[in-house]
Image (spheres, coloured by chain):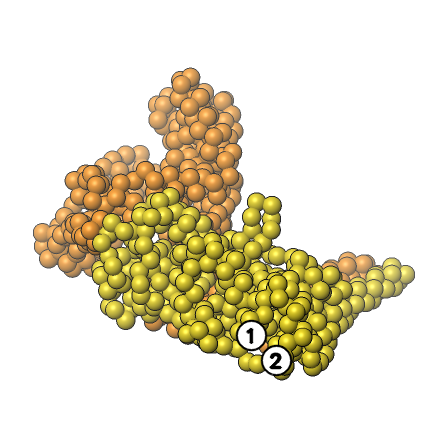
Amino acid sequence: MNNIIKRFIPQILAILFVVLIFGFLTLNAQTNMDNRGIDFGFGFLSQESSFDVQFSLIEYSGSDSYARAFLVGLLNTLLVSFISIILCTILGVIIGVARLSSNYLIKNTAAWYVEFFRNIPLLLQIFFWYYAALRALPMPEKANAWFGVTYMTVKGYYIPAMVWENLNVFLYCGFAAIIAIILLRNYANKLRDIQGKQIPVLLYSIGLLIVLPILSFLFGGVSLEFEIPELKKLSKISYIYEGGISLPPELIALVLALSLYTSTFVAECVRAGIEGVSKGQKEAAASVGLTHNQVLKLVIMPQALRIIIPPTTNQYLNLTKNSSLAAAIAYPDLVLVFAGTALMQTGKAIEIVSITMLTYLTISLTIAAIMNWYNKKIEIKEK
Amino acid sequence: MFKIIKQLTSLVAMFAVLFAFSTETMAAKKSKTLENTKKRGFVRCGVSQGLPGFSNADESGNWTGIDVDVCRAVAAATLGDATKVKFTPLSAKERFTALTSGEIDILSRNTTWTLSRDADIGLTFVGVNFYDGQGFMVRKGSGISSTGEFKNGTSVCTNLGTTTELNMRDFFDSKGISYEPVVFEKADEVVAAYDAGRCDTYTTDKSGLAAQRTKLSAPDDHVVLPETISKEPLGPVVRQGDSVWEDIVRWSLNTMIEAEEYGVNSSNADMMKTSNNPAIKRLVGAEGELGAAFGLDNDWNLRIIKQVGNYGESYKRNIADTGILPDRGPNELWTKGGILYVPPAR
């Protein structure tokens, strides 16, 4: 009996303490808000927002609701995080491997890159890329075409838009190709386990990915046309491109800054992971007759990944949270659109800030869950 | 068992601390802003982060501007010294939270008086110290001479968290023009982006355009279009719930405007005590007991006029002489063709 009390009383008290603090904070906020005549409630979410947003992945105008403005901001945050995570991973792996190169020049260039970009505050890098880009880029009418049809200008990067017909048929074909590849892989694994036969899975997979979509063009009625951006005059001295898709310079600057900055941390994770695999493993693998590529693919990387994944997850989370610095350069992310404009227009500070906090928490937990699942998948399966 | 008792007493102690906290916040709410201001010895005033003519700090940290003068007038009325003001520079986004949370007691930061701000978010507007309207600035070389010449795809730079964002949407929607809003948190960033050619036009209150134009690399290459697309009555704001403080701020501003109407200024205020006009005598505290209504002495308005000056002096010093808007336009007295009109101080 005494034992049980000893074990549980401190825990109950701790919980009580937390509840009390939250209770006090809520009560305090409530009485203060009542006193100042401020209402609390989420009804504003369905009201008309009456402001426009520069860049949106979904249809949006000022006559839509605040809830939709929230969604616009959220999608923009996810977009910039997603692109930056992919870019920083690719860059990070390259730099990380380069740091282990035996070539003096490559090794030191990579080391300098890491030291340079990770030691300058991110906000400064964002400002640098934005204002440097704005100053350096040409006005639309003076821009040279890149690849013939894309234009990098001070007002954004203009690329051709794809105009599809029967897009769904094309997507079904792509989907079918992916299912076929998964089935093929399972079959190939079985074949190898039972008969010891190897079939070139990669080659077949690429073939499937190319052939099936092409069939959809030939027989599925799918067609694709490109809408190429064309110069249009706004006034005597100002022009824009019309048609096609415009990527705003704010997005480009933000992606550049975030991925260059975070790639340095990813590079260090990769380097640590590869160096963390003991030399004996490599030598043992070589001595049983595996080729250099096989050693890397089958022995080193699977073990290195176990060391790389957990700290890299942290970097992905940091990147996502850092994307909120977007507000400084007018990229309409969640913080700018929702915790900025919407907050100002409604005055619902507590409601909007708590929604925004919960949203970032959810995004972070989701990324962590995905990475943990991947980590579980590649960890040593002890039987 | 002894241990449990010990833990319980600590819990009770914790309760006591929490209770003490909450009663203290209750007490603070009951006390008047005026009492706190007198106890503190200075007026807490929220201003902009630098808008020439309205609220702007020089190299040595001295604030000047017509918004600043409102806070100085309140300090002169309540504390007897117009210099006893602590200025807090605020972004458009922070301003209302700073006021409702009690960090400042007056928000005098070129803030537009609208229904939703007045009614919704725990604020009370006390008056108008500048009648403004939203306009557009474009490059002279563009050949655009009116807002009717904007075309689809025009990119527009502006500030976050302002009525400007809403007016701009109303304007372009009503004209059926598609536009690209590029919205920055700080005014300096808007200026930098517009200057770099990111946007075709820069929109905000016309007084703001006139002031920010001076910060561009080549101010003469830019022009403010003649049209005004909105009403922007700018004025000081106080927290809801302290009507005495609200009255003090309102009548400090009104005193400045009425003083100009009756020709009372900082240099002749003392002489006006012997004026034949009772309205003037009331204005300089020589007749009536006007200050008693707010719990102030009878010289409160005389101090405002002597230390800060009347509205006309403030406008001339801050806006006309600095070349921002030499023409007073609607901000002229109603007796001289403007719309500046305040209720009588009696």
Q: Colour of chain A?
A: orange
Chain of the residue on which disc 1 is drawn: B
Query: Where residue B178 sits in the image (x, y, percent)?
Result: 26, 62
Left/right placement of residue A204 relative to residue B86 reads left
Name the element at disc 2.
loop
For the point 46% across and 58% down, the residue is: B320
Identify which amino acid the numbered label 2 is placed on. Answer: Asn
Using the rendered image of the protein, determine whether residue B105 is visible from the camera's viewpoint: no
Q: Residue furthest right?
A: B2
Vertical position of residue A124 compared to residue B285: above or below = above
Question: Mark 1: few, some, or many residues within 10 Å (few <14, many ≥20)?
Answer: few
Which of marks 2 and 1 precedes in the sequence? 1
**Marking on residue B320:** none
Label 1, label 2: how far apart the Cα atoms are: 9 Å
Name the element at disc 1.
loop
Pick the front one: A289 or B179: B179
* Residue where numbered disc 2 is placed: B277
Pick the front one: B286 or B330: B286
Identify which amino acid the numbered label 1 is placed on. Answer: Tyr
* Residue where numbered disc 1 is placed: B262
Vertical position of residue A283 compared to residue A91: above or below = above
Left/right placement of residue B255 relative to residue A89 reads right
Question: Mark 2: few, some, or many residues within 10 Å (few <14, many ≥20)?
Answer: few
Give the yellow chain's letter. Answer: B
For the point 67% across and 75% down, the residue is: B274
Left/right placement of residue A248 relative to residue A351 reads left
Q: Do the dots labelled 1 and 2 sit on one chain? A: yes
Query: Where residue B260 sits in the image (x, y, percent)?
Result: 54, 70
Pick the front one: A351 or B73: B73
For the point 40% across and 18% down, the residue is: A105
Query: Where residue A258 sits in the image (x, y, percent)?
Result: 43, 42
Q: Are marks 1 and 2 in contact (CB under 8 Å)?
A: yes
